[in-house]
Image (spheres, rainbow, N blue to C red):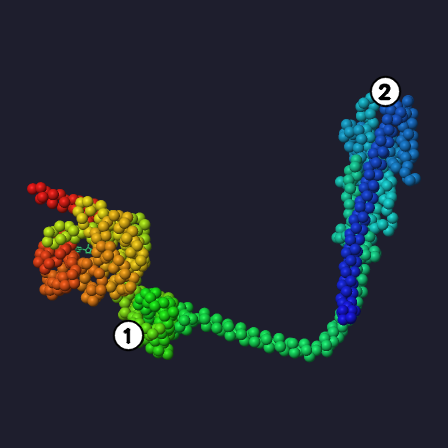
Amino acid sequence: MKHLKWFNSKTAIIIAGALLSAYLILILTVTNLGQSRLKESQNSALNLRVTNYTENLSFFIAANQKNVANLSQKRDVNTYFSNLAAGMSLRYGLSSSLFSLTRTIEQFSLSNKMDNQQIYSRVMIVGLGETIIVDSQPGASFDVSQLPIKQMETLGQKVHLVKGDHGIEVQLLQTIYHQNEAVAVLIAKLNTAVITGLLSTQERPDSGSYLALESRLGDILVWNSLPSSMVSAKLGSVNYAKASPKTIHFENDVQGTPFILKSWFEPVSEEDIFTSAWFIAGISLLALPVFLGLIYLMRVNNKNLILQTQVALSSEQQQKLAKQNGLLQQEIAKRIASESKLAYQATHDELTNLANRTHGMTKLQAAIRNAQAKDNQVLLLFIDLDNFKQINDTIGHHAGDELLKQTSDRLLNSVRSTDIVARLGGDEFLVIVPDIQHQDAAKLVATSILSLFELPFHIEQQEFFVSTSIGMSMYPKDGDNAATLLKRADTALYRVKDMGRNGFGFYDSSMNSNVQRNLMLNMRLHQAIQQGDIEIYYQPILDLQSRKIVAAEALMRWFDPELGFISPEDFIPLAEKNGLIHKLGDMVLLEACTQAASWQSISPITVAVNFSSVQFRYCEQLQETIVDVLLKTGLPANQLDMEVTESLLIDQGHSLMKMLAYLKQLGVGLSIDDFGTGYSALSYLQKFPFSKLKIDRAFINKMATSSSDESLVSAILAMAKSLGLKVVAEGIETEQQARFLQQHNCEFGQGYLFSKPIPAKEFMALLQRERDRKRLLLTS
Ligand SMILES: Nc1nc2c(ncn2[C@@H]2O[C@@H]3COP(=O)(O)O[C@H]4[C@@H](O)[C@H](n5cnc6c(=O)[nH]c(N)nc65)O[C@@H]4COP(=O)(O)O[C@H]3[C@H]2O)c(=O)[nH]1
């Protein structure tokens, strides 16, 4: 029912409108089509008409030429010219033959008719000497010089045009021959009225046409029924400017004549026919009130519908709407909340709620801008917890997170409300002090932050001591944008870490060049390892008593083609940082053990290999490698000495102790290298299964000049004895040093006094020489 109601009102109006539009479109299309078809057929009908005219005229001219040709061969014509050729005079036979010829010509002129009109208005015979022999109108004037007599002597026949007093004359010329010689020309002037009649057979006074025969000499007006406004005063030409653009025009050649038939036709006026543009416009206009009526009906109908709908809206629907509205509002509120949460998350660190890297950098940039305006200085502190990775690995990630949270709390509590604390990620924090007076004030800030870490952290009922390192940079001294300040504070931080951590340092420009060199070395070190540019040299270690080689210390040598010799003291810390130390360490171990195994047949010497404390981070793997190498090379385990530095003792862990105990059990020796330079805590010495102690060359070197160093060396030697450790003295350069050490029961020594580190080949030669000397001594 509802559907029907709706259909009856609105739909019916729309359908009616659509049908009316379709109807109008149809009418327009059909009438347009009809008009163009009409024009086409009108054009072709007129074309056919004109073509008929030209063909008729062609045929007419050709037929008359034949007619004239026949006349020229008539007996009378022949007789006359025979008599003339025979020299007959007019007085005798010639006058009678001229008489008969004249009669024939006149008869020819009179008898050839068309539609009761004479075809030839004048017929004449003119001799080649331009004398008129016969003329059907003897009284009328005739200009013989117009005739192309010379041409006709060879031509035979021709349609000849002459401009006369009454317009263009058409003459049919025919050469008369006697005994194959041209003797005269027969001229038959065509009646123009016959020609124009022939070309206007289908024209009527109301046909709206204009036809003209155009020639080189001028036009012959054939027909004109065009309105006078369209034709110019000048005879035989149409005023084109005034002719309607719709005027139909043809130009047709009349075959066999020098004429072109030109024709203009006024087309059937569109206004006169049912399908004219006015008619269509009229119909369309008629449709307009119908359209307006429909639109009016639609509006009235719509209003009714709206009214009906409003009335029909039930209270149930209103309730539904209110409910949906409520839900929508809730949804919007939720979205707003989640958007602001997202915005917060985008700028803050989830764990500590501090500003994150991006937000921290934005704040730093803002502080710089502010300082620029007020001519202030900005301090940036880059804070990094020392050994956080190890702590995290040992106590677990959860406790690691707790440590970071507590660090963040301590930092927030220590800084001023105007300072900004941010977390860059991992264990890296930033503190931005937007207005710092001078560098001393900056030192105070850094000291107070360092002191925050003097108190232990309490995590999961355990106490932890964690130190921190701080790198600092300042605006405007070190840079004028956030990125540069951060980079420079980072550089300063690295320097602090290098210097032993738990401290602070300012950026200075010389750091940059160090960083550059380190970057370069870093890159080249990779290449050097790949290309096998790193060699192993061996320095002999001697029994100071017997002065015989008992061991060799394996030392890395890197000769870079561009940078020259690079000391292991430069590239090993670098390799420790970038992790290449594992690769390098494995390489030295394999090479040294291989060499030492091959030297066993010459002398049972030990090989001492340096191990970086970084290599012990993966104890199990390292232990596996050492055992593998010993098995692979066949070097007895007790012929390998591992040299470690004091730094290893600080980062001690359970797995390290287990590994060292295991290796000692195998027979591998363990030496503490560079003794005296670091912490040198005796308690550590006791804990580890060391077999040897190496006194750093710095003490040996200074022994001669400093009595305190001499007594320190004696004390180390005494202490080593009490711990049951053998001692190797490094850096012996003089015989005096060697003797002193020998006297103080130092077992072993190495140094330039005996030999510098040398390539494997040379070392082997050294061993061989020593063996040969021994043999010599034994045999002598
Ligand atoms: N002035 C002077 N120096 C002497 C004399 N006798 C020995 N030396 C030098 O003293 C250093 C002894 O090695 P180090 O204390 O283990 O100290 C080594 C060691 O800690 C480290 N290193 C060298 N090769 C390796 C390696 O393969 N692995 C590891 N982890 N460290 C290595 O680099 C350090 C420096 O090595 P080098 O430059 O080869 O320097 C060597 C050696 O050439 C002397 O009479 N006078």
Residue type (three-letter) at the residue carrying disc 2: Ala
Quarter containing the N terminus: bottom right
Q: Where residue 379 appears, x then y in whole percent?
A: 33, 72
Residue type (three-letter) at the residue carrying disc 1: Glu
Q: Secondary structure at mark 1?
A: loop
Q: Where residue 458 appears, x then y in whole percent?
A: 33, 74
- Looking at this view, is 34 or 766 the one in front? 766
Mark 1 and mark 2: span between their CA atoms?
164 Å
Mark nearest the camera among 1 and 2 is 1
Q: Where residue 377 appears, x then y in whole percent?
A: 33, 73
Residue bearing mark 1: 454
Residue 525 seen: no
- Answer left or right for 379 relative to 565: right
Q: Where residue 314 appears, x then y in whole percent?
A: 70, 78
Residue furthest top as drawn: 86
- Answer left or right for 555 relative to 302: left
- Answer left or right for 404 relative to 501: right
Residue bearing mark 2: 86
Mark before the other along the chain sequence, 1 or 2: 2
- Looking at this view, is 528 or 555 the one in front? 555
Residue 455 seen: yes
Q: Residue at x 32, y 65 (%)?
A: 390
- Looking at this view, is 526 or 245 the one in front? 526
> Label 1 CB, ligand 1: below 8 Å?
no
Within the displayed image, which quadrant is ligand 1 positioned in?
Answer: bottom left
Q: Quadrant of residue 136?
A: top right
Q: Residue at x 18, y 52 (%)?
A: 551
Q: Quadrant of residue 499?
A: bottom left
